[in-house]
Image (spheres, rainbow, N blue to C red):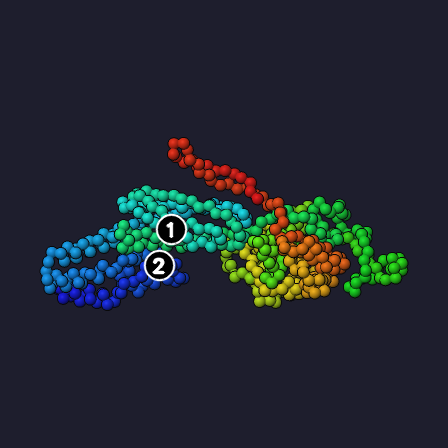
């Protein structure tokens, strides 16, 4: 019998070198248990009968290797010291193992986050509760957070008494628009001597969408007859209005609009420019070319362009003209799968559109009217990232998708080149010749001079393309407001706590 025991411990010593501290990670798809549990015989012994998300790992194993020496010394030179030492090692490790296994099924963490719509700049609140139903106290427990929300970390070290619970909360500012995940999480604790580590994996993940901020913009000039809101005067329901102005003849103009008296007076062909009722949709084309955007002192022309695109869509959709507004851009973000499907239905999102013969991910929201379209466009703008597709290529490959008799509003930071040196201006003029009305919103960086883009604006205005210049970082008041209900916990003078709901209007 003694020979069998010595042989078993000797074989175990050969098979089991002292391992480092185990750092369990989230199991891959298709794995029911961590790899350490598969290939470690002792780990399989510690974790027998436990759920797959619970793992017990030994942190200090080398004292167990003294047992063969103790048994050998007891056989060679019997003495009570060896017996006491052997029993002490077995008892200490047995008690430590019973401690962590007793808490493996009795400890749970519940989390609850504030619900509602989150816009960049809002606060996110999460409440956590560690409950312990075992008769043993939790001396320390490390809560590890693997969320991807920037600036958010709910990790901390807490403790809990026997048959009790402990609560804490985390409040973080939603600094950056995007699609993020809250979770997964891990709870790590150990026995009093830290001989064994208990890790409980919480693989539940909540997807949270941070929408871009919507602000009040200065009056954005649209083509003649396409202005919306209070800036537009009363018009008849159908049909053209008398000519509002005249301009030089273009090759694509019809001869029936030639103003013959003025042509004879000036000696060159002049055509009448009629103001017609709005028809078709308004396409907002957002330039996300990484080479065109800059960041100066934490002010990004990319983020400001997204705010401008979202704000322009909101103003056109909530105006009195009931215009249909769509979005077209090309983003460099990875496919989100079902990440945004629960937030809003956004038409063609996450898959290339047939009209876009490019190798990037097209984000296309077909024009629709109504307030619901605002959230579709915001959901489409939330995850977008810079790409290497130039604006000119986007306009050229999207001609069939944009259709005819609509309006194209280009939002771009490309203001340094003159019109003849900017390829996207030629593509915009080509769309105008095909029946689309064009407009441009230029985004200047904070350090650009006051006359930045003057040559480009002059050239576009000469081609009767309305231009508006906005400077990134300028103060824009919030425009999108909604009401939501949140819970507030207040302490009482006697040391208790009172929870009540508060309804507030946020922007």
Q: Circle 1 is placed at which residue position?
A: 143
Q: In which quadrant of the rendered image does the N terminus lie?
A: bottom left
Label 1: how many Cα within 10 Å (few below 14, some 14–19, many 20+): some
Secondary element type, mark 1: strand
Q: Quadrant of residue 59?
A: bottom left
Mark 2 burial class by Cα count in 10 Å: few <14, some 14-19, many 20+: few
**Residue 459 % position (x, y):** 74, 60
When the figure is inspected, residue 188 is found, relative to residue 420, above or below; the finding is above
Q: Is residue 500 above or below residue 392?
A: above
Q: Residue at coordinates 33% horizontally, 44% vertically from top-left? A: 160
Q: 355 and 23: which one is in front?
A: 23
Q: Quadrant of residue 296?
A: bottom right
Label 1 – label 2 distance at C-alpha: 14 Å
Looking at the picture, tell me which residue is in the foreground, 20 or 116: 20
Q: Which residue is mark 2?
A: 23
What residue sits 15% from the left and 62% below the top? Answer: 71
Residue at the location (31% across, 54% down)? 198
Helix, strand or loop at mark 2: loop
Q: Position of residue 343 (x, y in %)?
A: 53, 52
The reply, left or right, for residue 5 in relation to residue 463 is left
The answer to whether one can see residue 460 in this image is no
Q: Point out residue 54 in the picture as x, y percentages from the top left corner.
A: 33, 55
| Residue 81 marker | none
- Mark closer to the chain start, 1 or 2: 2
Q: Is residue 28 above or below residue 241?
A: below
Residue shown at 70% from the left, 65% from the top: 421
Residue 67 visible to an observer of this rendering:
yes
């Amino acid at each position: 019998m003694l020979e069998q025991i010595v042989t078993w411990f000797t074989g175990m010593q050969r098979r089991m070198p002292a391992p480092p501290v185990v750092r369990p990670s989230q199991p891959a798809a298709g794995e029911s248990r961590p790899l350490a549990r598969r290939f470690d015989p002792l780990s399989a012994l510690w974790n027998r009968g436990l759920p797959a998300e619970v793992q017990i790992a030994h942190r200090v194993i080398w004292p167990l290797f003294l047992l063969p020496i103790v048994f050998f010394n007891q056989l060679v030179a019997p003495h009570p010291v060896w017996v006491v030492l052997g029993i002490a090692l077995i008892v200490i490790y047995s008690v430590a193992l019973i401690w962590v296994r007793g808490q493996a099924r009795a400890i749970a963490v519940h989390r609850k986050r504030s619900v509602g719509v989150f816009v960049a700049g809002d606060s996110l609140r999460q409440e956590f509760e560690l409950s312990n139903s075992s008769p043993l106290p939790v001396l320390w427990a490390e809560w590890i957070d693997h969320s991807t929300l920037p600036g958010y970390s709910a990790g901390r070290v807490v403790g809990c008494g026997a048959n009790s619970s402990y609560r804490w909360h985390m409040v973080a500012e939603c600094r950056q628009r995007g699609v993020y995940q809250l979770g997964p999480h891990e709870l790590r604790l150990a026995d009093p001597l830290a001989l064994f580590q208990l890790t409980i994996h919480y693989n539940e993940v909540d997807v949270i969408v941070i929408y871009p901020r919507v602000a009040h913009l200065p009056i954005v000039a649209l083509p003649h007859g396409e202005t919306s809101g209070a800036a537009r005067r009363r018009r008849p329901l159908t049909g053209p209005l008398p000519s509002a102005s005249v301009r030089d003849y273009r090759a694509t103009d019809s001869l029936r609009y030639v103003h013959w008296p003025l042509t004879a007076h000036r000696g060159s062909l002049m055509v009448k420019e009629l103001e017609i009722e709005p028809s078709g949709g308004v396409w907002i084309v957002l330039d996300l070319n990484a080479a065109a955007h800059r960041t100066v002192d934490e002010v990004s022309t990319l983020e400001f362009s997204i705010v401008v695109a979202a704000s322009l869509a909101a103003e056109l959709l909530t105006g009195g003209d009931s215009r249909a507004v769509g979005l077209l851009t090309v983003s460099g973000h990875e496919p989100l799968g079902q990440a945004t499907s629960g937030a809003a239905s956004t038409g063609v999102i996450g898959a290339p559109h047939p009209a876009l013969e490019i190798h990037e991910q097209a984000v296309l929201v077909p024009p629709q009217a109504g307030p619901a379209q605002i959230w579709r466009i915001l959901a489409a703008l939330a995850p977008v990232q810079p790409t290497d597709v130039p604006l000119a290529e986007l306009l050229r490959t999207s001609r069939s998708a944009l259709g005819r008799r609509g309006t194209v509003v280009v939002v771009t930071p490309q203001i340094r080149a003159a019109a003849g040196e900017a390829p996207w201006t030629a593509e915009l003029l080509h769309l105008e010749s095909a029946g689309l009305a064009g407009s441009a919103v230029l985004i200047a960086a904070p350090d650009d001079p006051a006359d930045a883009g003057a040559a480009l604006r002059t050239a576009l205005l000469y081609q009767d393309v309305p231009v508006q210049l906005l400077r990134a970082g300028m103060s824009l008041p919030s425009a999108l407001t909604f009401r939501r209900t949140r819970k507030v916990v207040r302490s009482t003078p006697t040391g208790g706590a009172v929870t009540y709901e508060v309804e507030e209007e946020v922007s």
